[in-house]
Image (cartoon, helix red, strand yellow):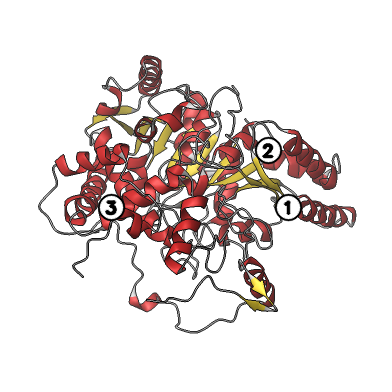
Amino acid sequence: MSKIMTVDILSSIKGAKESEAVGKLFETIKNANTSNNNAINANHNNAVSLDELREDIVIDSPQAEKEIIIENFPKEKNGFLVVAKVIEE
Amino acid sequence: MESQIHKIHQQLMKKEISCTNLVQERLDLLKLNTHNTVNSLLDNLALDLAAKVDVKIANGEEIGLLEGIPFGIKDVYMVQGTLTTASSDLLRKYKSPYTATAIQKLLDAGAIPLVKENCDSFGHGSSSENTIFGAVKNAINTDLVSGGSSGGSAVNVAKDYTVFSIGGDTGGSVRQPAGYNKIYGLKPTYGRISRFGLMAYASSTDCVGPIAKSIEDIRIVLNVMSGKDVKDQTTYQSEAISEETILNADEIKTVGYFKNFIETDAIDAKVKADFLASIEKIKAKGIEVKELDFFESDTLVSTYYTLAMAETASNLSRLDGTNYGNRIEGANLKDTYSITRSENFSEETKRRIIGGNQVLSQGFSDEIYLKGLNLRDQISENFEKDFKEVDVILSPVTPNSPPKIGDSLKDPLAMYLSDAYTVGFSLGQLPTLTVPQGTETGLQITAAKNNDELVLKFANFLKDTI
């Protein structure tokens, strides 16, 4: 994709602008010395081992959970949950 | 201070107090308090649970140590059926459909939840001013901030409104407010406690952390919440820490501190003098103290914030008003997303989301994000090297005393830099405890990964030493 996406589009925030304070943090990183080893994540290996992977099964939510999920839905009309808009493009 | 949990347990067992009265008394204190610590009270739930404890006691049944003990919960934890707002407009009316694992374990042990506590919105802040419920006021001086992001939790404990509270620590959000309010706050080793049901800020450093007035209470609550959880695959199985083992710190022979944290203009003169005086007292007990080299504070802060912003931009991308949250309809779907997010996120949250998307985007990621990851690896390697030399590392919690309410929001960079001493240990995923001693905002004790026990041991030693 060659289209350049600005931060407001990337963030879905109207009028989003880069912050000066955050820019200063990024400058520090750019100027820091990094090591040449490419072992990214070598020291914080939190990945789960293959033997311990959770079983790939669908667990049905309890009824109380389902009811609250519906209650949290922003809009309801005639018993239907109303989505914002359909994707048109 | 002695263990509040043991004390209240004895009072309940001896029928000196009833659980209902205890809970009602604390709820009244919370309701009337002017520190802005409360987002919502769980009064009906708490009183129902208290009545059940009273029935058990009246029937002569045994109760568990945590049974009937009132506690508080930072408003970023799911507790089924309760409002969970993350102190944000977006989730002002959001109800938790399920309960976080750490909280469920406390409920199973019989502890009684009183309150969802005020905090910086989505954990984004170091002062608990970034909230729709009003800035949380410091427990000791109400002109000052409580610290953050778990400010409401720290103040509730400091003021005895809750016996203990559960905060969340991503870059210092338990340790710093604990220091600002002169109590204990633990960030355990990453993965010791399940994050399931804790709203994600930066998933690779998010930790569930207990806040209390004694080391013993921290130990009790830590033990209950720890353990492997299939719903958070970064968790690991840990051994319970016994009361007896942490009373003896004889195995701690060497303590280190980071020279550059202390020899800098950024540290307040009194914090520096008090820290060095504490070091002298430790030396006087025959413990060897070593000066250690570490990364510059601005590198630590920049690395942490770069990675945390990238992770929060990703984690918070789900908050668009589609399935939940305060949806504001626009002309089309994209417009709906962006109006909903623009109107409902705070300035600080937006700043972090935008920064995160910046570093994750093409052209920036190599230069900043990947470099940040590389720096994080170097920081972790540095810690591994240090813990071959020393048993624990001691540091101040913050370079300065708590700022006045209103000052942090004006200068975000200054707020980020105030986290200089806490963020490194988050990046290293190390167990770190704030103790209310040594400097005006306390001291941090850090040990190697999975060595939370040693941190508590040294805390007991410091209690009697300085």
Classed neighbour count for the residue bearing mark 2: other residues with Cα under 10 Å, few (<14), some (14–19), many (≥20): some
Would you name the residue on which mark 3 appears?
B358
Find residue B409 and report its horizontal and vertical position in percent. Answer: 45, 32
- The residue where tag 1 is placed is B67
The reply to whether callout 2 and callout 3 are in contact (CB within 8 Å) is: no
Which amino acid does the dot numbered 3 rest on?
Gln
Sequence order check, earlier mark of 3 and 1: 1
Image disc number at residue B291? none
**In the displayed structure, does residue B328 sit left or right of residue B250?**
right
* Circle 2 chain: B
Quadrant (top left/top right/bottom left/bottom right) for the N terminus of chain B:
top right
Is B343 drawn above or below residue B162 in the view shown?
below
Residue placed most toward the observer, B261 or B128:
B128
Residue type at mark 1 is: Glu
Please state which of residues B338 and B201 is positioned toward the viewer in this rendering. B338
Q: Earlier in the sequence, mark 2 or mark 1?
A: 2
The disc, 2 or 3, on the residue closer to the chain's N-terminal end is: 2
**x then y, percent, for residue B288:** 30, 28
Instruction: Check if mark 2's residue and mark 1's residue have beta carbons within 8 Å.
Output: no
Q: Nearer the viewer, mark 2 or mark 3?
A: 3
Q: Residue B236: in sight, yes or no? A: no
* Chain ID of residue with mark 3: B
* Left or right, residue B445 beside residue B374: right
Distance from label 2 to label 1 (Cα)? 13 Å
The amino acid type, in three-letter code, at marker 2 is Gln
Residue matched to label 2: B4
On whether disc 2 and disc 3 are found on a single subunit, the reply is: yes
- Classify residue B177 as left or right of residue B379: right
- Look at the numbered disc 1 and give the secondary structure of its residue: loop
